[in-house]
Amino acid sequence: MDIIATLRGKIEQAGAGDHMPGLMAMLAHVEVADKHLKRGRRDADDSAFTDAVYRTNQAFEGGLKEAYGVLAKKNLDKARIFDIEQFFSKSNVFRKRVLDQFTNYRQEWRNPSTHDHKLDFSESEAFLAIVSVTAFSCLLVDEMALQLAREREEEAVKLLARTIKSKFDFSDGDLLGRVTEALKSYFTLRSLEELESNSYPQWLGSVAGFLSAILPDAEVLSEAQIGGEKQKFVADILVKSGDQSVVVQIKNRINIRTYKSMLVQLESLIASAGHQDGIVFYLPTMVTSGQVFEKDWIFSSGEGRLKVLSSVRL
């Protein structure tokens, strides 16, 4: 797998905006670092490996700055990299997997090379630095894409709110019923362009943004960690209102062979995390857009409910 090509693809899918020039500059630094690595190998020039690490540092800092603007809603004009790093270290803006990569690169590569001007890096170290910063950058762009998609969806729904609410009723019933009806309406509002081009983080952000706009009295969390220390579970979306909660898991496609075992496993995870209601939401496709089928699954304990929403009949 070409990890730099993966990063390039994620940036291209992230969507237009003020962040794009900065992300392209971040990508350029990674690509130049890779060229330094290849030059060092070709010419037996050990200094090229150190040059590669300094380039990955620039990619790291550039990515953080763009994330600071998108995720933290901060002005970049006078932002210092030290303040940005401190902000991300101490805030809860980064999800755990991104924070782990952030901490790893910062401690293993950026800080040593920044604070010791006599430090040299080997070929293996340069290679690891490139892989590390590129992996971090991929996760960072995913986080940004999720947030940007959520914001776009919230704005789009605000413009369509009157039309949507005239066709669907999201006010009656318990939270599970309201979230179910909201997600069913989501199927009917997708353009073919979205169905063809959206990445998974963009879908996740879009669905979360839609629910947030349609259910203003509810708290909508994406990639929410639920459960205790012994059995942690990350819900794609957690919707909370009063003493009610609904766990929403988003799936790209239906696998008939593993469908029932997936429901049994999800039931166990939701119940062990202290929740009772959940929805499995299969994303619409170009072929099946406009259709939505609903199926109920009762927990084996009788104290919980799962609904399955899909664009094909199960």
Image (spheres, rainbow, N blue to C red):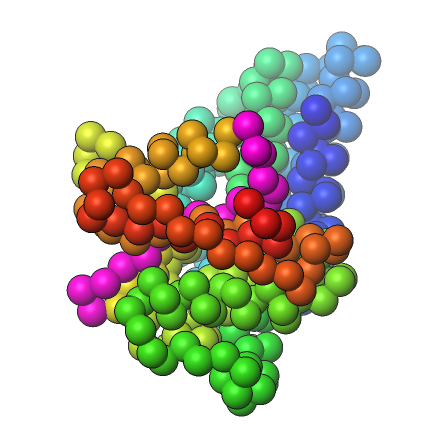
The answer to whether residue 51 is seen in the rendering is no
Which quadrant of the figure contains the C terminus? top right
Q: Position of residue 15 (x, y in %)?
A: 68, 60
Residue drawn 62% across the image and 50% down it: 312
Give the left or right position of residue 32, taking residue 185 as reference. Answer: right
- The answer, for residue 268, to whether it is visible in the render is yes
Q: Residue at x 45, y 33 (%)?
A: 260
Picture layout, residue 66 above or below residue 53: below
The residue lying toward the viewer, choosing from 29 and 148, is 148
Please identify the residue farthest to the top as the structure is shown.
44
Q: Is residue 185 or residue 12 the one in the foreground?
A: 185
Q: Nearer the viewer, residue 105 or 44?
A: 105
Please say whether residue 89 is one of the residues in the magenta stretch: no
In the rendered structure, which segment of residues is drawn in magenta? 242-257
Provide residue 264's location: percent of width, then percent of height: 36, 34
Quarter of the image that includes the N terminus: top right
> Which residue is at 51% across, 29% downward?
258
Is the residue 4 above or below the residue 40 in the image? below
Name the quadrant containing residue 291.
bottom right
Image position, residue 163 (x, y; %): 58, 86
Question: What x and y, as percent, mark residue 187?
Answer: 60, 64
Specify the quadrant of the image occupied by residue 188. bottom right
Please give left or right for residue 43 compared with residue 299 in the image. right
- Report the residue at 69% width, 60% height from top: 289
In the image, farthest residue toward the right: 42
